[in-house]
Image: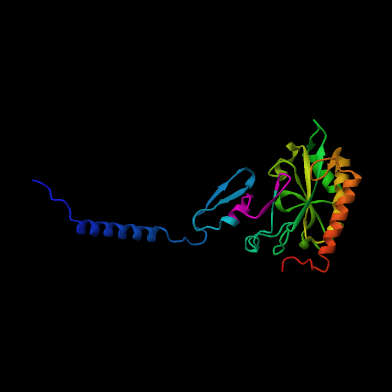
Amino acid sequence: MEQQALSPTTLRIIIAVVGAIVLALIYLFGQPKKPGQGRRTLFRGGGDTRIEPTLGGDAGAAAEAAGEPRQGELDVGGFSARDDAPAGARAASQPLPGRRPAGKPVERIVTLFVAARPDHPFRGPDLVVAAEKAGLEFGDLGIFHRLLDGKPELGPIFSVANMVKPGKFDMRDIDRLETPGLSFFMTLPGPLPALDAWDAMLPTAQRLAELLDGMVLDEERSALGRQRIAYIRDDLRAWDRRHEGDEIRFGR
């Protein structure tokens, strides 16, 4: 028997019905999940826990828990430093020493490097001892910080990271760590005027270079000489003058 072709009206009805079914399925299975759903927890060696976000989860908080880069990060000589992560993401965990308080954007970063001599990389245990002698404290982001005496909640005066990406120091494997150098950086505005922060960071870099038999380099990774130091001091003195009268208050 010869089959009759469907009329245009019938085809339109069929298409409309199929479309309605598809929309209903999207509505049913596309609803946001309740808090805590839609996440997988993976356990790695040493008790490290990583939260992987899926649709409906807080991707930013999960990335922070995993130690992964977030939006608004600053690249500092091979180290990615968060530029004032949202306060909501930080409230979930206890603040660590050296964490920059929320609510104060970074306007400038000043860097120095302490480089190892050729074929003589810095070793992890030596770094820890030198950092302790130089008054640094291990804390937020897995790096070292110099904190303001009596007011650690104001954030770091400056920080010290591994020159090799991702820049962190894994204390569980510190005995096997070797690195060609360290990245010193201070973020402005900070708990001290810029020139005072520099006058704290430079001697510390020189002290670590002495303890580790390394070399202090400027932001271009060239030898840091007196002329360059004088220029940086003048530049930071001018920065302080431009910001004179500004209240350096964090976390408000």
* Residue situated in front as seen by the camera: 72 or 158: 72
Rendered position, 121 above or below 230? above
Quarter holding residue 156? bottom right
Identify the image quadrant of the N terminus. top left
Q: Residue at x 89, y 43 (%)?
A: 225
Q: Residue furthest top?
A: 119
Task: Describe residue 60's horizontal placement relative to residue 214 as left or right.
Answer: left
Q: Is residue 166 above or below residue 92?
A: above
> Which residue is at a point 50% across and 58% down the rendered structure image?
56
Q: How is the image coloured?
A: rainbow
The C terminus sits in image quarter: bottom right
The one nearer the camera, 218 or 58, is: 218
Tell me, yes or no, if residue 230 can be seen here: yes
| Residue 36 place in picture, x, y as percent | 52, 59
Quarter of image, res 15 = bottom left
Q: Is residue 139 left or right of residue 194?
A: left
Residue at the spot 65% in from the left edge and 63% down from the top edge: 87
Residue nearest the viewer, comparing 191 with 8: 8
Q: From which residue to which does the magenta span run?
A: 61-79
Residue 150 visible? The answer is: no
Was residue 9 drawn as part of the magenta stretch in this picture? no
Q: Position of residue 191 (x, y in %)?
A: 80, 61
